[in-house]
């Protein structure tokens, strides 16, 4: 019990500055998945340019920003064992649920980082990334400057994404979809290679992997899902 209390205190002091009153039980469970969850920034940053050493192979690296509880990441990693996947998520419970799902499948090509999407350049090296998935990000209505997909993201990808690499984007927000199409038209190094305003009625539907949000949204609402593939061309 004393050892566990020490672990709790160490974790708490790593994540929070204020004194501990109570704690999220999933915080401690991060330690149950050392092969699937990295939460210390220094460790992540030390793998910059060396993720192939972490995975133990030379396979291309794909990344998802905002994995939720990992349904999408787990399924795409199963479908593509020839690729390595990094998933970013902030919430302790979601990280643990995602890691547990991948562990049960004995997947060895997935790791989850407790990290923000704005920090990609801190733990990825130049041209280390082959693809990026952004599924249903907050559209930030009225505060569009806070959106994940904006010019600053592509400025980061100018260095990090390989030529030929693709950003895959799904959203239920029609204006966000249109705004991203308009944005890409202004970028010299990128072009839209596919887009549809109704993913589930398109030729991509058969191979589409539904996220948790997507399942819920389709169940509760009769709303189209927008989808874009954006390729770095130079």
Image (tube, rainbow, N blue to C red):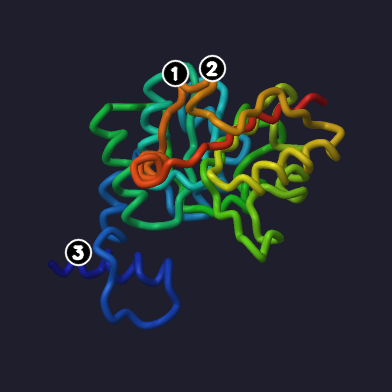
Residue 126, quarter of the rendered image: top right
Q: Tell me how far mark 1 sits from mark 3, CA to CA.
A: 47 Å
Q: Residue at x 67, y 65 (%)?
A: 143
Residue 62, quarter of the rendered image: top right
22 lies above or below 73: below
Specify whether 99 is left or right of 177: left
- Residue at image mark 2: 203
Q: Tell me how far mark 3 sits from mark 2, CA to CA.
A: 52 Å
- Residue at image mark 1: 206
Is label 2 in contact with label 1 (beta carbons under 8 Å)? yes
Residue 208, image x, y percentages: 46, 25
Q: Residue at x 12, y 67 (%)?
A: 1
**Element on which disc 1 rests:** helix
Q: Residue furthest left?
A: 1
Q: Residues within 10 Å of mark 2 (few under 14, many from 20)?
A: few
Q: Nearer the viewer, residue 141 or 155?
A: 141
Point out the image quarter for the C terminus: top right
17 lies above or below 78: below
Residue 110, image x, y percentages: 41, 32
Q: Tell me how far mark 2 sits from mark 1, CA to CA.
A: 7 Å
């Amino acid at each position: 019990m004393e050892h566990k209390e020490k672990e709790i205190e160490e974790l708490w002091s790593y994540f929070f500055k204020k004194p501990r009153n109570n704690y999220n039980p999933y915080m401690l469970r991060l330690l149950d998945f050392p092969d699937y969850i990295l939460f210390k920034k220094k460790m992540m940053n030390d793998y910059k340019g060396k993720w192939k050493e972490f995975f133990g192979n030379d396979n291309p690296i794909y990344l998802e920003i905002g994995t939720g509880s990992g349904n999408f990441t787990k399924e795409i990693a199963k479908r593509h064992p020839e690729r390595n996947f990094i998933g970013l998520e902030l919430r302790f419970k979601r990280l643990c649920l995602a890691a547990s799902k991948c562990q049960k499948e004995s997947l060895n090509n997935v790791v989850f980082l407790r990290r923000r999407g704005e920090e990609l350049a801190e733990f990825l090296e130049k041209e280390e990334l082959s693809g990026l998935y952004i599924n249903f990000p907050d559209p930030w209505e009225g505060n569009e400057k806070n959106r994940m997909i904006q010019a600053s993201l592509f400025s980061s990808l100018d260095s990090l994404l390989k030529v030929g690499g693709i950003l895959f984007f799904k959203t239920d927000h029609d204006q966000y979809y249109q705004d991203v199409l308009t944005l890409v038209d202004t970028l010299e190094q990128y072009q839209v290679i596919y887009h549809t305003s109704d993913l589930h009625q398109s030729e991509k539907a058969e191979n589409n992997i539904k996220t948790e949000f997507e399942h819920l949204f389709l169940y509760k609402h009769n709303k189209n899902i927008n989808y874009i593939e954006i390729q770095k061309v130079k």
